[in-house]
Image (cartoon, coloured by chain):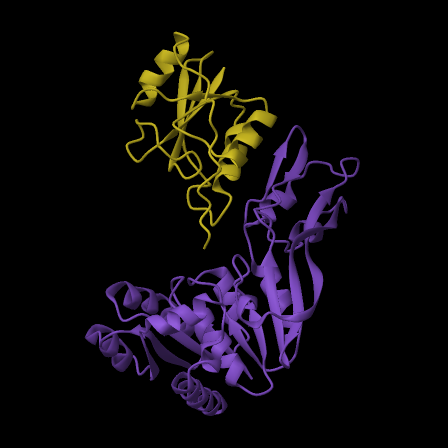
Amino acid sequence: MRIAVLSGKGGTGKTFVSVNLAAVAQDVAYIDCDAEEPNGHLFFRPESVKDTTVYTMLPAFDAAKCDGCRKCLEFCRFNALAFVQGKPRVFPEVCHACGGCALVCPQNAVTEEKRAVGTVKQGVSGGIPVITSMLNPGEVSAVPVIKAALHATDASAVIDSPPGSGCSVTEAVSGADYCLLVAEPTAFGLHNLRMVHELVTLLNKPLGIIVNKADGVYPPLEKFCADHHAPVLAHILYSQKLAQISAEGKLAVQHNPQLRQLFESLWETVIAEAAS
Amino acid sequence: MMIAIPLDETKKNVCVSFGRAPYYLFHNTETNTSDIIENPAARAAGGAGIQAAQFVADHSADTVITVRCGQNASDVLLASGIAVYQSAQTSAADNLKLLAEGKLEKLSHFHPGFHGKA
């Protein structure tokens, strides 16, 4: 069972929901897929952490074999190749490592070389496997690192997704059985919820909404959820105390019995919804 | 000399985008003839700058006049021995005139690109 937690913008409370949910759930791993700024480990402080380098493939061209037919350039949908001074040249940050150029080359002039793009860190915190994806600075695509983090374990997991609704988010939630959409009760929050809701609906995933930092009811958000038959599973009230506990790197469910209850019942609901 | 200039929808004015300009003007100074050709990179999913630079190089251009140009595109242009000048006028024709008078400056700043992080 894999539960993905996502939201359209950063700072909504994905990591807050993910780490606290994983902390109350039994026998699940926490996988941080926010590879550009993973911070779930700050709450778990995992021990005996092992690093695994993540590589992606990059084409290399044998100038002696290349006859300049340009079939590789025509094939590349990402325009990661150019043909200059009589030979092909690759732009590493544009290449998606599909391997197509090597497949279509009639001269077998293309081989693939490994290129490190990030790290997957695996540790344990109080019995919870904590897996963190980390993209190397300057890399454009987090997808290979996220993929590696998701494959690091077969265990049930809470997946802390990156913000937004782009390629990295799609990768993070692609294998999820259920999606938890975190939203703030504001016009901006609703705008972002619409985007992730569209993505998750497109991927045919069952979903539920969590309204975080709820300092009041925002009717348009409630209406959107009702109109789209998206169940609102919890309203987490805005509290400066909760914010402070989180800012100190503590798991709020371990310091606030009410919140613990909320997350326990949320987990039960999610498991039941995901199984149905 | 073959000069390439990215054009906007008017087919007269220089387009602010190098990679995604809808058209390109190719002006041959020896025959004094011009061709306007659709830019195959205009709607590319990604790598538009690289593809547009390739398109320009494949049309035997040795000079480009543009408002701006990204790092990847400039890598292709410079490696292909193409000189890149900074556009100083709205219309392509006025820029051609300025270039002929030696009044255009080489583009000195290449931006990192606007690659959408979609």
Q: Which chain is purple?
A: A
Question: Is residue A239 shown left or right of residue A30?
Answer: left
Image coordinates of residue A155 in percent, x first then y, are 63, 81
Q: Is residue A135 above or below residue A263?
A: above
How many marks can you see?
Answer: 0
Q: Is residue A80 above or below residue A207?
A: above
Q: Quadrant of the C terminus of chain B?
A: bottom left
Q: Residue placed farthest to the top in the image?
A: B101
Give the residue displayed 44% in from the left and 89% down from the top: A273
Q: Is residue A242 above or below residue B98?
A: below
Image coordinates of residue A130 in percent, x first then y, are 61, 73
Q: Residue placed farthest to the left in the image?
A: A219
Q: Which chain is yellow?
A: B
Work out whether residue A199 can be spotted.
no
Image coordinates of residue A58 in percent, x first then y, are 68, 49
Give the residue displayed 33% in from the left and 70% down from the top: A240
Residue A14: quadrant of the picture:
bottom left
Image coordinates of residue A92 in percent, x first then y, are 62, 45
Q: Nearer the viewer, residue A19 or B14?
A: A19
Q: Residue placed farthest to the right in the image?
A: A64
Question: Is residue A261 shown left or right of residue A232?
Answer: right
Give the residue displayed 44% in from the left and 20% down from the top: B85
Work out whether residue A86 can be spotted.
yes
